[in-house]
Amino acid sequence: MSAEGAGQGPGPEPGSEPGPLCPEHGQALNWFCCSERRLVCAACTELGGRCRGHRIRRAEKRAEELRNKIVDQCERLQLQSATITKYVADVLPGKNQRAVSTASAARELVIQRLGLVRSLCESEEQRLLEQVHGEEERAHQSILTQRVHWAEALQKLDTIRGSLVDMLTHLDDLQLIQKEQEIFERHGGRAYG
């Protein structure tokens, strides 16, 4: 057995909280077997135990690693949220203004050109104005669609980050380890070993 962590061998921690017990030995599950990726008791790591010779860590150390990885994930989500917020605040208004200006300039150009030949092409003027208006509407609709998309993305990121933070604050070490796979499958990450 290779025990990592505080340098002490497997055994019950003085003053530790009672928790789930090993189904084989009836002892507290205070250790994590890295080979089998499950909680084990001290007896599982000793001679004749199922995890003898495996890489073993204190459950608290494993939970601390998971917490750190979840915090890192939350920080990455926060950076993504900040980038999207900046994009929505800084880039989309400029795109909208450029679309409006371009449409306005196009409208003016069409009106000037048609003014020269109005007597010959009254119906053509109406068609071109409708075409310019349609382009303006499409550009405006595209920007509105982008705003909705990025707002939904921000909401999803906030929801995921909130869920992860809630897990960090409400799950104890053993629950965190037991729900590791579920946490990372549900939130698009991966289980950490």
Image (spheres, rainbow, N blue to C red):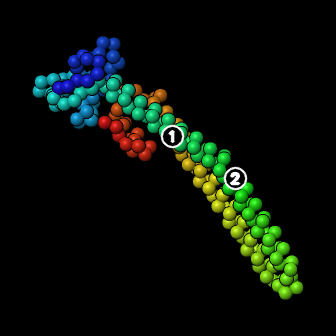
Horizontal arrangement in the rendering, residue 142 relative to residue 81 (left or right) = right
The answer to whether marks 1 and 2 mark residues whose Cβ atoms lie closer than 8 Å is no
Q: Position of residue 183 (x, y in %)?
A: 40, 39
Quadrant of the rendering where the N terminus is positioned: top left
Q: Position of residue 191 (x, y in %)?
A: 35, 40
Horizontal arrangement in the rendering, residue 102 relative to residue 9 (left or right) = right
* Residue located farthest toward the left when viewing the structure as drawn: 48
Horizontal arrangement in the rendering, residue 168 relative to residue 180 (left or right) = right
Q: Nearer the viewer, residue 24 or 39?
A: 39
Q: Up-down: is 151 above or below 51?
A: below
Q: Up-down: is 12 above or below 117?
A: above
Q: Which amino acid type corresponds to the residue marked 1 in the rendered image? A: Leu
Q: Position of residue 131 (x, y in %)?
A: 73, 74
The residue identified by callout 2 is 94
Say which element carries label 2: helix
Q: Residue at x 53, y 39 (%)?
A: 79
Q: Which amino acid type corresponds to the residue marked 2 in the rendered image? A: Gly
- Residue 62 in view (yes/no): yes
Of pointers 1 and 2, the one earlier in the residue sequence? 1
* Residue located farthest toward the bottom when viewing the structure as drawn: 120
Quadrant of the rendered image containing residue 33: top left
Real-space Cα separation, disc 1 to disc 2, in angstroms: 25 Å
Say which element carries label 1: helix
Disc 1 versus disc 2: nearer the observer: 2
Q: Residues within 10 Å of mark 2 (few under 14, many from 20)?
A: few
